[in-house]
Image: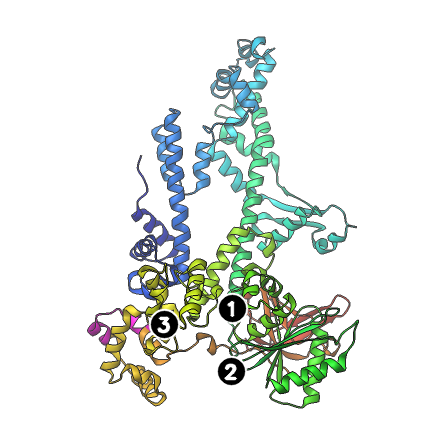
Amino acid sequence: MERVTRVDYAQVIAGELGVKPRQVEQAIRLLDEGNTIPFIARYRKEATGELDEEQLRQIQARLTYLRNLATRKNEVLHSLAEMEKLTPELQAAIAEAVTLQAVEDLYRPFRPKRKTRATVAKERGLEPLAKRLAEDASEDGNPLVWAEDFVDPERGVASAEAALAGAMDILAEAITDEPEIRQAARTFLWKEGVLRAELKDADAEQAREFTMYADYREPVNKIPPHRILAINRGEKLNVLKVGLEFDEERLIRMVSERSIRYPRSCAVTYLQQAIADGVKRLLLPAVEREIRAELMKEGERQAIKIFGVNLRHLLLQPPVKGRRVLGIDPGFRTGCKVAVVDETGKLLTMATIYPHPPQNRREEALQILEGLVKTENVDLLAIGNGTASRETELLVAELLQKMGRNRVEYCIVSEAGASVYSASPLAREELPKLDVAMRGAVSIARRLQDPLAELVKIEPRSIGVGQYQHDVDEKELEAALAAVVESCVNFVGVDLNTASPALLSYVAGIGPALAGKIVAHREQNGRFKQRKDLLAVIGLGQKTFTQAAGFIRVPESANPLDNTPVHPESYAIAEKLLAKLGFSLADLQDKSELQRLRASLRGLALTEFASELGVGLPTLQDIADALARPGRDPRESLPPPIFRRDVLKMEDLREGMVLQGTVRNVVDFGAFVDIGVKQDGLVHISELSEAYVRHPADKVAVGDVVRVRVLGVDHQRQRISLSMKGVAGD
């Protein structure tokens, strides 16, 4: 049996992605050799024709699918051969199948089945009668007479009518098992089906969330993914009754037209009965399950995609460097936990204040905060946005007004996932003497200083910047989000001497086990002096070093290239490029010389140098960019978070007001924006721009600072409607 070759994979995938087969072939080769996607995307651009990470992940996913498809084809061919059911036509059809569903459809008529009405009828010897009903073209025969030959009480066939009933069971199953019939039914339901939803119990407490689906109808092929997930959640909670509506009789007629060879045959009435029974009892329930499952998959794919996009923007928010931060984890009964960290995130001091009910020790809280700000030289306060956040923000605004310090500001920080981190083994290891709530305050302060370094400590799906993330497949979500975190970590780079095990675990090729060994080595032997010292870590070999080296940074190294994205394998090329321009490595650490180097690089014809140095142009361009900005954090070019000194109340909002806000979440139907009040406002997709917006993510991203106009405020429902039309520069 012929197997699919790698060339076939490359051709198929290249056609799907619109790239050259040679690019895919090289990507497959590099993946099969064990290279990581960040490494291939960054350091093997010449080999793949500069395929980016997203394209490489698509290739990896499709390659896995196609290989699984080939494996399944071979399993089915082997099984059919053993059953002596494999014909040249069937073998050719299986070889040409392009989906697992198509292979399973072809195998279905032959696959060993559990006990069914059709298998029982076959055991009673009724297959010949079923075959005659389907193939006899005579117009004047009598199927009841044919059936009398199959009456056998000992085998459970008591009468001619019973024989005909059994034969029709065989036909019902055989016809609805036909691959063409099943595919036609799928196509029919996709085109003509309508998804319906109804409230089961309108008085149920959970029903309020699903009132828009109280009497809902929408064509299957037009349902937005987020509605699919909402409806499925309502069904899972037993609040909604959900199903498909379609023209059943029309489908039966369609199957009959495809299945009945002799419409004038005397057996046609029995065939029609068998088809109607098979469609209703066997085909429709199965195909409806498939359609619902595919709708769910589509909803999950979109939810995972949106979560991934939002997570990427959240992780890549610019760090707030060089500032001492006082983090506050707000609370009522147990008080607000306060932690001060220095510019590197080191915990300096902590306190607990009780400004809110039931204690109401507001003046005492103000005195404690003022003392901490003064004695620890704090210039930025970070307030978690959870319970009592609004009340704590009012307290901080009063504090700043009282102190009159213009340089001191505050910022609201999303504390999503902070409680997950606080109770984790990693938090207990990092802050062993602190209780869970105080760890949360430290985390809030640190995530303002460096969002990426702090957020990687939290299980990605607990961060909560998506839609219906709790309704999707956990494994698929986890894999997709892990890929996003890996991409972000390697895009930014990691300081080998300060990175936590959580951060290091996402560096290409390292993983959790090696990350722990690296930190243990650092604690036992002191700081790493250069990149190649990583090879001294037990269990870390040359192959892993090759994958990871370009993504780690050692700012203290004597070789300034160790603090750039230049890979050690390209150090010689970097030095030759510098020499060609009249510079040395030492000049990378001299500000005036670095300015001259940048000017020289700007006017450089890299194409000529690439040929002369024997290196590809994409790699040389990356090297030149790294030399121009050694130690640069790519997040620094993004807009910083909004810092405030005063507070805005929801009661202050008026229709028409124009405000500045931060995008907190992007979903299929719009974007939620923090405008400085307790409740985030919604910019509906229709209000994002004067021009058509296909999806909100095409217009805004998590972390964006945007200008919005207030459209309306619903105080009772705590909802704020916003618009970016005419104020966002679109």
Q: Considering the whole magenta stretch, tell me its main secondary structure.
A: helix
Determine which quarter of the picture holds residue 560: bottom left
Q: Gap between marks 1 and 2, in whole Å?
A: 19 Å
Q: Which residue does the numbered mark 2 point to in the structure image? A: 322
Question: What residue type is disc 3 on?
Answer: Pro
Image location (x, y in percent) of residue 502: 49, 64
Is 618 a magenta residue?
A: yes
Image height of 429 relative to 245, above or below: below
Image location (x, y in percent) of residue 657: 68, 79
Q: Which residue does the numbered mark 3 point to in the structure image? A: 565
Is 575 a magenta residue?
A: no
Q: Residue at x 52, y 80 (%)?
A: 343
Q: Gap between marks 1 and 3, in whole Å?
A: 19 Å
Crowding at mark 2 (Cα within 10 Å: few <14, some 14-19, many 20+): few
The disc at residue 315 is 1
Q: Is residue 247 visible?
A: yes
Crowding at mark 3 (Cα within 10 Å: few <14, some 14-19, many 20+): many
Q: Which residues are magenta?
A: 608-622
Question: What residue type is disc 2 on?
Answer: Gly
Closest to the observer: 98 or 665? Answer: 665
Image location (x, y in percent) of residue 614: 21, 70
In primary-sequence order, the first of circles 2 and 3 is 2
Closest to the observer: 446 or 101? Answer: 446
Q: Residue at x 38, y 78 (%)?
A: 556
